[in-house]
Image (cartoon, grey):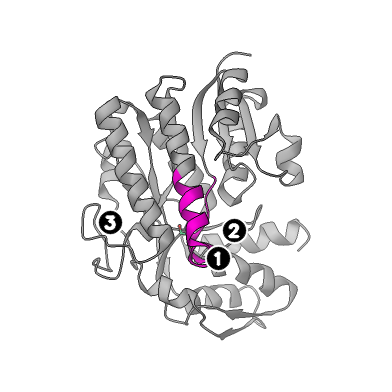
Amino acid sequence: MGKTILILGACGQIGTELTLALRQLHGSDKVIASDIREGGTELMASGPFEILDATDSNALEEAVIHYEVEEIYLMAAMLSATAEKFPDRAWHLNMSTLFNVLRLGKERMINKIFWPSSIAVFGPNTPKEDTPQSTIMEPSTVYGISKQSGERWCAYYHKKYGVDVRSLRYPGLISWKTEPGGGTTDYAVEIFHKALKEGQYTCFLTEGTRLPMMYMDDAIRATINLMQAPAEALSVRSSYNLHAMSFEPGQLARAIQKHLPEFEIRYAPDERQAIADSWPSSIDDREARQDWGWAPQFNLEETTATMLEALQRAGN
Ligand code: SER
């Protein structure tokens, strides 16, 4: 079979599109998709798939040997809002999967690892605007604590054991192929589905909650570019800040109203508001730009137009 890439959590919001993009790049049979359950039709039809629980270290090692895996993308995780409801399970899932994969790197069973971090590593004491790469962090959510700890472990395994693990601090991700689940930034996806189906949406964040966001195509391009960059170009081995745009729910609603003038939005903030309030509004990503040439392509208007068009085409 030759060397392959293994995606853990391939059926999630990022995993689905990452798998499809990597299959375009390397060929379908070179990219093994895996998850604890089957995913969407397009993903399942696009190449090999394996039911695999990434918390199961032995099963993971067997898959790595069987498929001659040389690169792993660990996309399985519990997101911020769900993690607040199940703190123990979130910590276990988010950390044990990372340790399982880092061990494979340390033992030289695989060559390269991608592990996603998040803007959730920052907390209420972090500067909110143009948040720098290195600053006060102090995350106040279980998810954020798991991501910040994970970043430290990645940096440690790189320094101590020479493991080539690479990471990005994703902002809220907007996409149409697979819906996110359990996140605080999920409103920015839900709103499109509701706008098309029901003409109205009740947002769980306030009108003025400004958060960093990114269209999925940009996130996938960033991930692939980071993984293709020469190791010596990378100055950050915890996780890179990454920015594309920042907006408030009110601004997103107005961008949708330009296409769907009848669309109505209401605001009923819930427990996710406190999580959003603890996160930055915008991110300084100069290290990513300098080290591996990062530049986003989608702004709010392009994202809105693309989302509405794609969801309408997909029959929503
Ligand atoms: N988008 C994620 C969430 O809202 C943050 O990484 O949980």
The foreground one among 120 and 88 is 88
Where 275 sits versus 261, above or below?
above
User: CA–CA distance between discs 3 and 1?
Assistant: 22 Å
Q: Earlier in the sequence, mark 3 or mark 2?
A: 2
Q: Kindly give the residue lying farthest to the top in the view shown.
A: 2
Task: Tell me the amino acid under the disc marked 1.
Answer: Asp
Magenta residues?
Answer: 76-95
How far across and how far down the image is residue 218, in percent? 48, 48
In the image, the residue with mark 1 has its CB under 8 Å from the nearest atom of ligand 1 = yes
Residue 186, numbered label: 1
In the image, the residue with mark 2 has its CB under 8 Å from the nearest atom of ligand 1 = yes
Looking at the rendered image, the disc whose residue lies closer to the viewer, 3 or 2, is 2
Task: Tell me the amino acid under the disc marked 3.
Answer: Asp
| Disc 2 element | loop
- Badge 2 is on which residue? 180
Residue at figure coordinates x 30%, y 31% from the top left: 158
User: CA–CA distance between discs 3 and 2?
Assistant: 25 Å
How far across and how far down the image is residue 273, in percent? 45, 77
Task: Tell me the amino acid under the disc marked 2.
Answer: Pro
Report if the CB atoms under discs 2 and 1 are less than 8 Å apart.
Answer: yes
Residue 79, numbered label: none
Looking at the rendered image, the disc whose residue lies closer to the viewer, 3 or 1, is 1
Q: Quadrant of the N terminus?
A: top right
Q: Is residue 160 left or right of residue 261?
A: left
Residue at figure coordinates x 31%, y 27% from the top left: 231
Residue 284, numbered label: 3
Report if the CB atoms under discs 3 and 2 are less than 8 Å apart.
Answer: no
